[in-house]
């Protein structure tokens, strides 16, 4: 059974978010939701769906932890980064944005950002990408 968390009374009200969250629930994928905002847990990768910066459209943000030291730079860290890039590739976007977060010393992370103007397109694309990602 999927681990799901949310704030009571803040369930998704839009069709696209309900469809995405229903897909996650049906597939047993761990996620947290507050309205349309959804945080999906895929091993070491976290995928967030929320309004894009500036309130223009929506974004899928894939966050992957990076090694904080050379002894942490092992095969598992490489697999997590490869998985994040593979998922980003499955989204089929023309443009990807990248942010390096070093705000927590010793715990850097990379965010891969894909923006969408149409939230239904975002949901369709993300569901299809997750199906392919999980099938591999």
Image: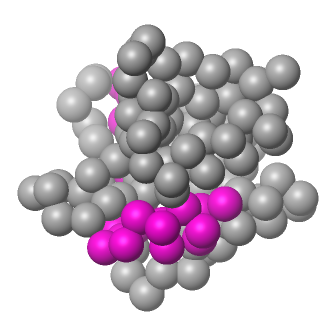
Of 103 and 30, the residue lying toward us: 30
In the image, 3: left or right of 16?
Answer: right
- The residue sitting at the bottom extreme is 94
Horizontal side, residue 82 vs residue 5: left or right: right
What's the magenta region? 106-127
**Front position in the image: 40 or 67:** 40
Asked whether, in this view, residue 97 is left or right of residue 43, the answer is left
The residue under the point 17% across, 65% down is 56
Residue at (28% x, 24% y) in the render: 105
Mark yes or no: residue 86 visible: no
Farthest residue toward the left? 54
Check residue 5 for magenta coloring: no
**Which residue is found at the position 81% from the left and 41% from the top?**
27
Residue 78 as seen in the image, left or right of residue 47:
right
Residue placed most toward the observer, 88 or 20: 20
Q: Is residue 129 visible?
A: yes
Residue 84 image offset from top left, x and y in percent: 59, 55
Q: Eyeballing the image, is 111 above or below 56? A: above
Q: What is the x, y in percent for residue 21? A: 60, 41
Residue 117: quarter of image? bottom left
In the rendered view of the protein, which quadrant contains the C terminus?
bottom right
10, above or below 108, in the image: above
Q: Residue at x 55, y 45 (%)?
A: 18
Q: Which residue ends up furthest to the right in the rendered image?
A: 135
Q: Is residue 120 within the magenta segment?
A: yes
Instruction: Look at the image and tell me in which quarter the N terminus lies.
Output: top right
Given residues 33 and 115, the one toward you in this image is 33
């Amino acid at each position: 059974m999927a681990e799901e968390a949310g704030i009571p009374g803040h369930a998704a009200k839009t069709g696209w978010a309900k469809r995405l969250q229903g897909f996650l629930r049906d597939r047993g994928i761990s996620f947290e939701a507050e309205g349309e905002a959804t945080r999906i847990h895929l091993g070491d990768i976290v995928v967030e769906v929320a309004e894009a910066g500036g309130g223009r459209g929506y974004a899928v943000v894939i966050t992957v932890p990076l090694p904080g030291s050379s002894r942490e730079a092992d095969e598992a860290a490489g697999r997590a980064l490869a998985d994040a890039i593979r998922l980003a590739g499955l989204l089929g976007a023309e443009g990807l944005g990248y942010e390096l977060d070093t705000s927590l010393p010793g715990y850097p992370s990379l965010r891969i950002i894909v923006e969408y103007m149409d939230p239904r397109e975002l949901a369709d694309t993300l569901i299809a990408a997750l199906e392919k990602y999980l099938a591999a």
